[in-house]
Image (cartoon, helix red, strand yellow):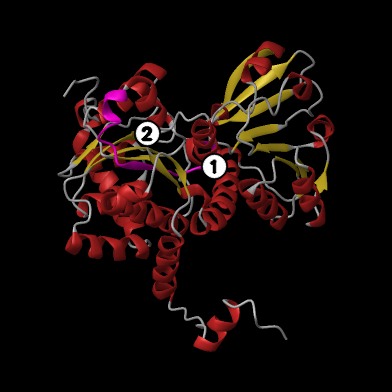
């Protein structure tokens, strides 16, 4: 195995205290993740991932760590690294690296060379299954490590941006193994994207700035599932919410939900706080910076740091300074100060105080990841190269585990009702 980089425990000095703190974080979140707790118990008995090696590029923090533990309990060797240079919690990464069968290369704040070096180190473990958040691992394999393609059973993709990229890749016949679109299944999208992104983004921004939402004009760029969550929760905290959109139907949906809708060129003049959620580049650019109000604050809740054009902002500004931890401010020639959180990276995970999505939300998303990995290990031959929907029975399995954990019971269809729904002959 080539040694592109060493595991995190060999990169830093204070391993013991970091591992202790990371273990404490893992212990805390584990008690609020009943789905993964159930799957751990089941997997320890059945060992569905025995002999598999799983490569992961994810946000390495405590909730992700519990997923890693569950996969290892299922019999897998796990090698992981970060999918964003600012979202890794070094203490959790070190704690995971101390465990048998787990190798963590994730470290916070690395440059591009070290970031991709860590991905290469993960791939040097010769994975049979990949788990991605954003697609960097899959793209690295296809572009630089094609020697691995023959032995990889398949992969899972966690987030909207990654699934979009992979669907384009598949359309070009460039995706050479099956990948489950974990992001698109109901147990992920309806909760993680709406409630997780909504709650975590607003909480991270409020703690980073110490500003109130009440009375603010909040501009949300994009009204997909993540944008909906942010807009609804900001409105719930008494903000005036403006939505910008490119899709006429989604724009109409935002309007019908009571939000103001207008182009960014108009919203830029009104907003106090801007949050981008589109997954596209250049959402806020030079023409918008030029008309923003003094004191405007910008953040990105999309996966990559391309939505706010920082090159334009840097060029327009006379000076740049760190106003608060995780808050970079730019003073314009006319005296206005515009601020950006987390260097334009994923705000719910990349600010210094970020904790990511709520534990209960990620329990559901990571439950889907775990059963998809199990499906690839036990039934990979059923899936050809390309992007695949998560089988509905897997999504329902996780929902049922969650309902049981919450003590919630629901109705069941009678045989007569099932016959009615499955027949075209029944009328009134």
Q: Is residue 259 magenta?
A: no
Identified at 65% across, 36% down, the residue is 276
Q: Secondary structure at mark 2?
A: strand
Residue position marked by numbered label 2 in the rendering: 82
Q: Nearer the viewer, mark 1 or mark 2?
A: 1
Q: Kindly indicate the quadrant of the structure image that contains residue 271.
A: top right
Q: Please tell me the numbered disc located at residue 160.
A: 1
Q: Residues within 10 Å of mark 1 (few under 14, many from 20)?
A: many
Q: Earlier in the sequence, mark 1 or mark 2?
A: 2
Q: Is residue 157 magenta?
A: yes
- Where 407 sits versus 330, above or below? below
Q: Can you say which quadrant of the picture contains the C terminus?
A: bottom right
Q: Is residue 66 visible?
A: no
Q: Is residue 188 visible?
A: yes
Q: Secondary structure at mark 1?
A: helix
- Where 281 sits versus 335, above or below? below
Q: Kindly indicate the quadrant of the structure image that contains residue 246.
A: top right
Query: Residue 375: x, y in percent?
Result: 32, 54
- In this rendering, position of residue 213 left or right of residue 423: right
Per the rendered image, the range of residues in magenta is: 146-161
């Amino acid at each position: 195995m080539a040694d592109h980089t060493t595991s995190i425990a060999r990169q830093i000095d204070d391993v013991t205290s970091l591992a202790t703190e990371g273990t404490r974080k893992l212990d805390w979140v584990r008690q609020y993740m009943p789905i993964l707790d159930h799957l751990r118990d089941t997997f320890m008995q059945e060992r569905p991932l025995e002999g598999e090696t799983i490569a992961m590029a994810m946000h390495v923090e405590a909730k992700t760590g519990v997923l890693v533990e569950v996969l290892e309990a299922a019999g897998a060797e796990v090698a992981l690294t970060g999918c964003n240079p600012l979202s890794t919690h070094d203490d959790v990464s070190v704690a995971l690296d101390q465990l048998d069968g787990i190798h963590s290369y994730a470290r916070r704040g690395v440059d591009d060379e070290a970031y991709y070096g860590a991905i290469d180190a993960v791939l040097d473990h010769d994975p049979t299954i990949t788990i991605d958040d954003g697609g960097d691992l899959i793209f690295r394999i296809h572009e630089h490590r094609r020697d691995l393609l023959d032995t990889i059973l398949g992969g899972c993709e966690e987030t909207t941006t990654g699934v979009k990229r992979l669907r384009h890749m598949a359309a070009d016949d460039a995706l050479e193994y099956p990948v489950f679109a974990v992001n698109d299944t109901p147990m992920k999208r309806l909760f993680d994207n709406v409630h997780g992104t909504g709650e975590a983004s607003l909480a991270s921004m409020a703690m980073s700035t110490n500003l109130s939402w009440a009375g603010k004009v909040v501009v949300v760029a994009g009204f997909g599932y993540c944008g909906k969550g942010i807009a609804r929760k900001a409105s719930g905290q008494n903000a005036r919410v403006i939505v910008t959109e490119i899709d006429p139907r989604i724009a109409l949906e935002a309007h019908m939900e009571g939000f103001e809708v207008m182009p960014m060129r108009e919203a830029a003049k009104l907003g106090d706080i801007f949050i981008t959620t589109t997954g596209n580049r250049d959402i806020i650019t030079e023409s918008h910076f030029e008309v923003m109000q003094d004191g405007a604050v910008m953040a990105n809740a999309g996966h990559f740091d391309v939505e706010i054009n920082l090159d334009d902002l840097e060029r327009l500004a006379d000076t740049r300074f760190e106003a608060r931890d995780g808050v970079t401010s730019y003073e314009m020639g006319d005296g206005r100060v515009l601020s950006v959180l987390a260097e334009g990276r994923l705000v719910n995970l990349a600010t210094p105080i970020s904790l990511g999505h709520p534990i209960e939300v990620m329990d559901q998303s990571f439950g889907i990841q775990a059963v998809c990995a199990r499906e690839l290990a036990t039934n990979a031959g059923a899936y050809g190269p390309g992007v695949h929907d998560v089988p509905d029975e897997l999504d329902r399995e996780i929902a049922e585990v969650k309902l049981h954990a919450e003590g919630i019971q629901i109705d069941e269809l009678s045989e007569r009702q099932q016959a009615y729904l499955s027949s075209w002959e029944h009328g009134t």
